[in-house]
Image: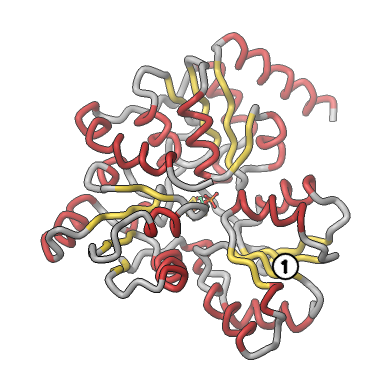
Amino acid sequence: VQADADWAREIRALADERDAVLLAHNYQLPEIQDVADHTGDSLALSRIAASSSASTIVFCGVHFMAETAKILGPDKTVLIPDERAGCSLADSITAEQLRAWKAEHPGAVVVSYVNTTADVKAETDICCTSSNAVDVVRSIPADREVLFCPDQFLGAHVKRETGRDNLHVWAGECHVHAGINGPELAERAAANPDADLFIHPECGCATSALYLAGEGTVAAERVKILSTGDMLTAARDTGARSVLVATEVGMLHQLRKAAPEIDFRAVNDRASCRYMKMITPAALLRCLREGADEVHVPSDVADRARASVERMIAIGK
Ligand code: 13P
Ligand code: SF4
């Protein structure tokens, strides 16, 4: 415990010396979340990065998140404790693939999930996160075709919510969320009949959850498809005593802090993102001591990507 306290004190002192703000995504290790200035979902952290007056942003999350902060603040120093922290979803579409897809649909509006590389964002009209994807697509005139990439499950969710037939979805996925499957959810829901289901829209089981509600196995009002930030708001508002959570397991830490009286359980407790977990206490300490790893986005790419990211942070709650 003493070692943990010494580590946290050193992190805070080094952050002050560097005029750095520490941001941590909800999937980070608990000790990283607890030492950060701000925790949140992708949208909230992008907004904080954009409005922060600190000269350095230390992004405890994955590489595309740090790149997004750099696109929004090209004059800031943006650090990530381990630049190898990638994302299988961001890897599921390249800028070249997106250009070829656009050529097949001239005039379509491209909506990319924030879980994409800077090169893909540079080919994008509007970025979105899981908390504002529906609002972003609703902001596009109904007669325009939409290309939505790269997450097929988030795309299916947006298509369901907006009822848009002219929305085309790329077939990418996040290996962690895709692995939380329908049969597993059905089994957990049957064993916990009074529990709410909090489901991230990147999950393979989101459709199964709606099916369970449709056939009456789970009361429809208990099924909630939510971004990680919206899960925290829902946790404070729900009257449920137990909640089954379908997302990366790091989320349980913030949920338990927000509503200690609720029994939160993972639908799949092996759903851990190895990229998110590369940001260890040792890596964060090295980052602040050495000023590494620094994130760079070529200025021509950042300039082309910026408008799509600025539209993202302007839309939705
Ligand atoms: P949100 O925090 O925006 O819900 O994103 C989830 C995610 O998978 C980030 O990698
Ligand atoms: Fe990417 Fe999935 Fe990890 Fe999120 S949980 S960073 S989407 S691989």
Q: Position of residue 186 (x, y in %)?
A: 66, 82
Indicate the position of residue 56 as horizontal and vertical percent values: 49, 18
Q: Residue furthest bottom?
A: 215
Per the image, label 1 sits on a secondary structure element best described as: strand
Is 253 on the left-hand or right-hand side of 207? right
Residue pictured at 48% horizontal, 31% vertical: 80
**Residue 278 image-quadrant placement:** top right
- Horizontal arrangement in the rendering, residue 275 relative to residue 198 (left or right): left
The residue shown at (76%, 56%) is 237
Up-down relation of residue 134 to residue 21 (above or below): below
Q: Nearer the viewer, residue 272 or 262?
A: 262
Q: Which residue type carries mark 1?
A: Leu
Using the image, determine if residue 193 lies above or below residue 288: below
Q: Position of residue 154 (x, y in %)?
A: 45, 64
* Left-right relation of 29 to 56: right
The residue that mark 1 highlights is 244
Image coordinates of residue 174 in percent, x first then y, are: 45, 61
Q: Residue at image x 38%, y 35%?
A: 67
Rate crowding at label 1 as few (under 14), some (14 to 19) or many (20 or more) other CA atoms within 10 Å.
many
Front in this rendered view, residue 196 or 30 = 196
Q: Quadrant of residue 3?
A: top right
Q: Nearer the viewer, residue 142 or 42?
A: 142
Pick the front one: 58 or 86: 58
